[in-house]
Image (cartoon, rainbow, N blue to C red):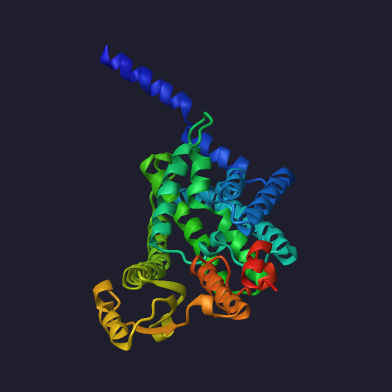
Amino acid sequence: MDDIDTTRELKIRMEQTYTAEEFKDKMYTNLKVRPSDSVILMCSIFIASIGLNMNSIPIIIGAMLISPLMTPILSIGLALSLYDMKLLRAGVRLLLVQVAVSLTVATIYFAISPITYASNEIIARTEPTIWDVIIAFAGGTAGIIGAQKKMSNNIVPGVAIATALMPPLCTVGYSIATRNLDYLIGSSYLFVINCAFIAIATFIGVKFMGISQVLTKQDANHKKINRLLIGLSVLIVVPSIFSAATLVQDSIVRTGINNFIEEEFSDAIIISQDYQEDDNLLLVTTTGKRLTEEELADIESRLPDYGLRTIELSVTQVPDLNGLSGEKVAELLQKYLESRLQQFNLFDSRQIDLEDLPFELQNEINPN
């Protein structure tokens, strides 16, 4: 009875998944350059660019769901595993066409968009870390498993969202349009990470699923490819580890600064705070209760308690706002708003004029 159940289960599983030959033929079919797929790609990159520009996560997710970028990357991983140079050339050709179309559409959009500042979603795609490597590898593993299933499933669309192939390409287009070299390098690196480790995960997944054993025989060429992929993986991973370490250290410092200011300046009104990383200098502007030189020295001596041992403190105290003119209050308020906006990475260097403030607030600051 158990043998009958096992046989039935295997038969059902075979009906639900492609055989090795069917899966290979499916990949060949999907790699044809079709005008309809190009239109879908243009629409998805356009939607993703708008989502990044407007800092809208739902719009970005919608664009990733309709993106066809996963297909050639999975095909490249399969081709490497099978040592099928024809399939590899077809996958690389389609990927290059899709990248060229995506960059063209994204660059044109950001060149004509009236919103030129870098949103949070754009900035998030400029500093790839080891976590992006892990996500891409896990996504590629899930992607190749989902691609082998005959029945429609949500695995491949989910992988497209998790690995986020579209946003880095859009960010590259933004970088080209705004001539931002740092963003260009960071976003390009993130896209390379995603593509490389999805392909590598596909390569490994095909081996474990037995597809390569059915369609090919092991030879010296496969050993060369294995060594090449290992070397490529190390080459890509190393910079991401350093980036992750820098990001973690920066997060620790920022958290320490926020805790330090919140606890040590609890009786004062913080107008602005600015951490100058290059000089290891924390600039704080306060109003309200005035602190003596001895109190300031005591506060600065407690910096090591917050993990800020190497940072110097500079405090500027302004008089009570009630004793200042409307023009001076407006100037201080502008500095405060700029500091807060920069703190949340909403703007890089945008100036805020008094006329941009709500009408009621203008009257409060400058009743004349």
Give residue 297's quadrant in the image.
bottom left
Pick whichever, 24 or 316, lies toward us. Answer: 316
Residue 179 placement: quadrant: bottom right
Identify whether 55 is placed above or below 257. Answer: above
Q: Position of residue 157 (x, y in %)?
A: 53, 41
Location of residue 228 by image quarter: bottom left
Residue 343 left/right relative to 56: left
Q: Residue at x 66, y 45 (%)?
A: 32
Q: Position of residue 275 (x, y in %)?
A: 43, 78
In the rendered image, residue 82, in percent from the top left (x then y), is placed at 46, 48
Q: Is residue 84 visible?
A: no
| Vertical order, 221 against 21 (above or below) | below
Q: Which residue is outermost to the bottom? A: 293
Q: Quadrant of the C terminus?
A: bottom right
- Residue plotted at (52% across, 30% down): 150
Residue 11: horizontal and vertical position, in percent?
41, 21
Q: Is residue 3 visible?
A: yes
Residue 315 vs residue 68, the one in the foreground? 315
